[in-house]
Amino acid sequence: MAEQVGGLTYTILDADKMTAAEIYGDVLTQIGGQRPEIVALSADLAKSTKIGKFGEKYPDRFFNVGIAEQNMFGVAAGLALAGFVPFVSTFAVFVSMRAGEQVRTDICYQKLNCKIIATHSGISFGQAGTTHHCTEDLAIIRSFANMTVIAPADGFETAKAVQASVDWKGPVYIRIGRGFEPRVYTDDKFDFTIGKAREMRPGTDVTVIACGTPLVGAVDAADFLKKNDGLSVRVINMHTIKPIDREAIEKAVMDTRRIITFEDHNVIGGLGSAVAEVIADLGKGCAFKRVGIPDEFSPVGYPDDLYHHYKLDSEGIIDTVREVMGKEFEEDEDWQDEF
Amino acid sequence: MHKKDSKSRDQLLDYLDDKAEWLRREIIRLSSIAGGAHLGGGLSMADVIVAVYYYAMNLKQGDPTWADRDRFILSKGHGAVAYCPVLADQGFFSPDWLNTFNNLDSPFGMHPDMKKIPGCDMSTGSLGHGLSVAVGMALTARLDKKSWRVFVLMGDGEINEGMVWEAAPAASHFKLGNIVAIIDRNTLSLDGPTEEIMAIEPIAKRWEAFGWRVFDIDGHDMGALVDTLDKLPPSSDPTPTLIVARTVKGKGVDFMENNPIWHYAGLDKAKSAEALTCIGNCRPKRRT
Ligand SMILES: Cc1ncc(C[n+]2csc(CCOP(=O)(O)OP(=O)(O)O)c2C)c(N)n1
């Protein structure tokens, strides 16, 4: 899908100077030049979410509704009904909870072409505390029928997701962090297809499945464990949470029989749960562990400290992989006969 | 410490201005510890919160759970940096705690958390919730036949939220004259001027139409604040009160005043020092 919107001019050099959020702001602005049907909305967070970049270029197609998120999603629905493609951005916590019902009923039920960029998700807004953390959105939003849910890992992938979402039918929820997260990709020369996971590192001993910010730690951890422990860790970037790439998960079960998920979200209902659902459907034995926020309200702290606290940085991921590899796991030689 | 019994009005106003100056200095100091803070809205609300906490509210120094205390909800929760020092100064916890601001597991972050901060009556940060909670608290006071009041401080941008306009008629419908809402009318929200983003004027007329008594005053004039707080009806009154406090975002630090880029910002050493000098220079003239 990404090829359909061409001619982007942002360069790696630009990207070096820009946060993830700024990259997507630029990309959206460029796509806006080719697609007059794109409109953008913000609720007094045009600057914080960077959707304001679009507004500066196309003031007639940009609506700042003030601090009124429920109203914003209703307005977006009205625009989408007439054939416009609204890109709507606010903090994840206000999309999924403050305006959750407007998103579900006004947008998803009608399967409207509304693209949502939910920023500051998970614990990425550390110092802002519980009211601004959002460790519930994947659970809530992926249960809305018709919704596509994407959690890109860095600025490049966010840009790809934004491009891909333009021509994707129906509502799309793109969940990003605060925008200052470290980069996973070194450039934009990679394929991004909605619903198709990416293998970041091949491996045969254990599979780590991650999305969003923890992915960078997962990749580093795999490299470290290969060098120091001789472990072959497969790392899968499950950027699309819905529709989830069942094949990649099933293959990981068969190939490695050990799976660990890492996500910046409550362990209930997010990536780990989505992966567990696929494993359970498959009916094959597999050592499995979910790492995320352990069903509690996350405390105040700088983001790096919080990621460390919840074992979502490379150090924590290394610990968890070692722990899972150290556990007895009864391999059943006949497991191909099961079912 | 309550100063209702001050010898003279001038002494009282000087005392309150001193507190406001101290609070502004605390905001700057804490922003350095915290690596940044909501400076603009913190500085704009400083005089208002000082007048409310040190003059209007019925509190017991050092006793954050006293049952008959007046309640306060910082509905514009991002003003925590201008709120937590006041709670410490009321003796609810040691001021040393404030030095952990924003660090892992600190009671203090950008937004106040009632489960961690003694004297904080409600956790806030998501805008628009405070007035509804105030309605619930005020109903409690009625049910318990108590005369305490609920003060609630909102941002002007905050009143864009629909929830505020669900709570406003509820307060008058339930005849909750024990609610005192204040709007920190600094004319800016995060992206810029409220009247350009989503107009909220005429504020007074809108609230009057919802059944409220409205005072529209200069929110940096301690005399005006005290006079208005003196005019509050008894808490048994059927009409809720709104004070529109006309303020300046960034008040007291001239390079921050009326500039939305200071909504949230960090200061290096030099800028901090400059800000503190401004605060000293901007202090209202002493009366005594
Ligand atoms: C429901 C909600 N939406 C958005 C935000 C993000 N936000 C924090 S402060 C702010 C601007 C607030 O403006 P105002 O109420 O005027 O406060 P002040 O200018 O006094 O800081 C916004 C949009 C939030 N905290 N809550």
Image: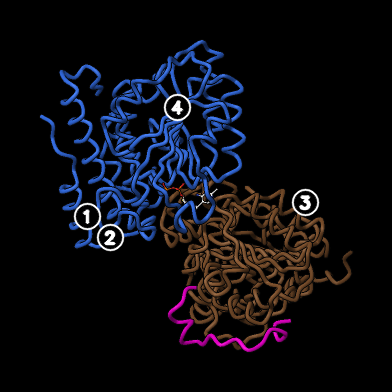
Chain colours: A brown, B blue
Mark nearest the camera among 1 and 2 is: 1
In space, the residues marked 1 and 2 are separated at their CA atoms by 9 Å
Q: Are marks 1 and 2 on the same chain?
A: yes
On the image, the x and y values in percent for residue A59 come to 57, 69
In the image, taking residue B159 as reference, residue B88 lies left or right, namely left
On the image, the x and y values in percent for residue B169 come to 60, 29
Q: Are marks 1 and 3 on the same chain?
A: no
| Residue closest to the eye, B81 or B252 | B252
Asked if the residue under mark 2 is in contact with the one under mark 1, i.e. CB atoms within 8 Å, the reply is: yes
Query: Which element is circle 1 on?
Result: helix
Q: Under 8 Å from ligand 1: the CB of mark 1?
A: no
Callout 4: 10 Å neighbours few (<14), some, many (20+)?
many
In the image, taking residue A118 as reference, residue A104 lies left or right, namely right
In space, the residues marked 1 and 3 are separated at their CA atoms by 49 Å
Residue A3 in magenta stretch: yes
Mark nearest the camera among 2 and 4 is: 4
The residue under label 2 is B267
Residue depicted at 26% across the width and 51% down the height: B28
The residue under label 4 is B180
Mark seen at residue A105: 3
Amino acid at dot 1: Ala
Q: Earlier in the sequence, mark 4 or mark 1?
A: 4
Residue depicted at 55% across the width and 69% down the height: A55
Q: Which residues are magenta?
A: A1-19
Query: Which element is circle 3 on?
Result: helix
On the image, the x and y values in percent for residue A256 come to 70, 74
Mark seen at residue B275: 1
